[in-house]
Image: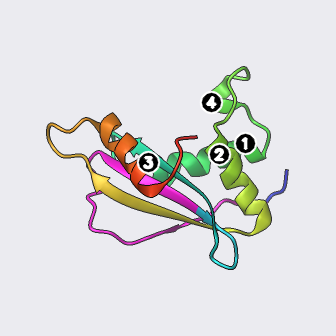
Amino acid sequence: MTSAAFSYVEIPSTIDPARPLIYKWEIRDKDGQLLHCYVGKASGGASRPRCAYANNVRRLRVGLPWHGQPTRGYRQIHHRLSEAVDAGHDVTLVLLCNIEEGEDINEVERRMRLEHGCDGR
C-alpha cells in the first residue's frame, strides 16, 4: 500500500452536525465526472463520517484488519476511498439532512440512497 493519506472536502451546509443525520460521499475524477457515491447514516452525528472513515481507510492502507477482526473485511466504500487516494481523485462529504423527531433513520437513509442514486456499500 502507498503512504498517501486520505483527505476530503466537506461541502458547507446548514445541517446540524451534532444531531443524527444522513451523509453522502462522492468520488470524482479530475474532470469532475462522478465515479461513485455512497449514502450512509450516522445516529451520533457527523463525527462518524468525518473521523471514522479516515481511520478505516488509514487502517486498510497499512494492512490492519477491520477493527481487529481479521475475518470481517472492510466495506466496499472503504476500498473505493482508498483507491481514490491512489488515483488522485477528489472526495467530498456532503451532510444531506438531519433526522427529525419521529423519523426512522433507516427509512430516510433508504429514501436518500434512491433519491441520490447511491448504493449502501
Residue contact at pointers 2 and 1, CB within 8 angstroms: yes
Residue matched to label 3: 113
Residue matched to label 4: 67
Task: Identify the amino acid type marked 4.
Answer: His
Which label's residue is closer to the chain start, 3 or 2? 2
Element marked by disc 3: helix
Residue matched to label 2: 78
Tag in front: 2 or 4 = 2
Of the 4 image quadrants, the one containing the C terminus is top right
Q: Position of residue 77 (x, y in %)?
A: 62, 46
Q: Position of residue 52 (x, y in %)?
A: 53, 45
- Residue 67: in sight, yes or no? yes
Residue matched to label 1: 60
Closest to the observer, 34 or 68: 34
Magenta span: chief secondary structure: loop
Element marked by disc 1: helix
Residue furthest bottom as drawn = 31
Closest to the observer, 114 or 43: 114
Task: Identify the amino acid type marked 3.
Answer: Arg
